[in-house]
Amino acid sequence: MDQSKEQRILNTVSYNAVKGDPESVMKCIDKYCSQYEWAMNVGDEKGLILDKIVEEADPSVVLELGTYCGYSAIRIARLLKPKARLLTIEFNPEFASIAKEIIDIAGLSDKVTILEGHSEDIIPQLKKKYEVETLDFVFLDHWKERYAPDTVLLEECGLLRKGSILLADNVVFPGAPEFLKYVRNNQRFECTSYPSHLEYMQVEDAMEKAVYLG
Ligand SMILES: Cc1ccc(Cc2cc(O)c(O)c(C(=O)NC/C=C/[C@H]3O[C@@H](n4cnc5c(N)ncnc54)[C@H](O)[C@@H]3O)c2)cc1
Ligand SMILES: [Mg+2]
């Protein structure tokens, strides 16, 4: 059976990236996906916005929803202080195992834990099973219609605290209308829009930051 696109992305990283160098892994993926096969990584343009927001927040505990190949997990984890950690949830076993290898090549396995399963099943386990108290930063990049229900679930599970930052990818393309409606009409969130473009394309997109006010 011929390889998947995600397997080809792993191949190009393992052949061309410098082991232990997250930037070279990111460059390798961005180069491959802009020149050969488009893939739904947050990419280098939105990635720079993500970098700035993570650096400003300097979070200790980060949750990512939708690991895919691990590009944004690497992007975020490379900026975290020594004791900080990133938990990332992925339900596709092939993507989870490819992401694990790519994160390992980047030398970030000690900061990143991939939790295999559905976000709606794992989020309620974060406190007891994964010893999370509250989340400092959440990056939403999974199925877009899950953004709103999972935001409600995070709040219901007591995982958000005053100042917790939610950052959602793709609120323009493919779009996350229910999520935008939910956070923008909700006094408990302070929202900011970051206009940008779809990864590797000229198409308009944006990320939305929603700070939980408690
Ligand atoms: C045809 C087409 C292609 C790309 C686009 C443009 C475009 C651009 C983008 O930046 C995009 O992020 C997307 C997009 O659809 N992302 C969905 C990303 C899912 C990943 O997360 C995983 N996952 C999905 N739901 C869950 C869940 N509950 N629990 C755990 N993991 C989940 C999946 O297993 C995947 O690993 C699309 C538009 C149209
Ligand atoms: Mg995305």
Image (cartoon, rainbow, N blue to C red):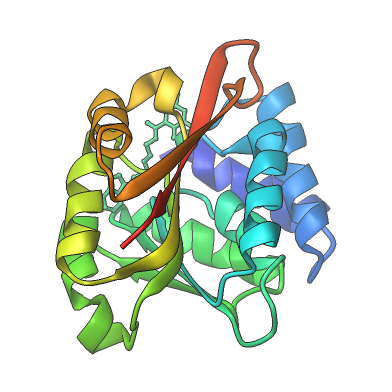
Q: Quadrant of ligand 1?
A: top left
Residue at figure coordinates x 64%, y 68% from the top left: 58
Residue 29: give x, y in percent of width and height.
Answer: 69, 42
Q: Position of residue 168 (x, y in %)?
A: 43, 41
Q: Is residue 78 above or below residue 1?
A: below
Q: Residue drawn at (36%, 57%), measured in percent from left and top?
A: 213
Of residues 211 and 43, the one drawn nearer to the viewer in this rendering? 211
Q: Would residue 124 appear left or right of 204 to someone viewing this image? A: left
Assign the C terminus to one quadrant of the image.
Answer: bottom left
Q: Residue 203 appears at what percent x and percent y? A: 57, 11
**Left or right of 188 in this view: 201:** right
Q: Is residue 63 visible?
A: no
Does residue 156 lie above or below 47 as drawn? below
Question: Is residue 49 rendered to the left or right of residue 21?
Answer: left
- Picture quadrant of residue 90: bottom left
Which part of the image, by quadrant, shows the N terminus? top left
Counting labels gives 0
Task: Give the residue drawn at x 22%, y 61%.
Answer: 155
Picture quadrant of residue 182 = top left
Instruction: Specify the farthest residue to the front.
Output: 187
Q: Residue at x 35, y 43 (%)?
A: 142
**One can see residue 147 in this view:** yes
Q: Position of residue 170 (x, y in %)?
A: 45, 29
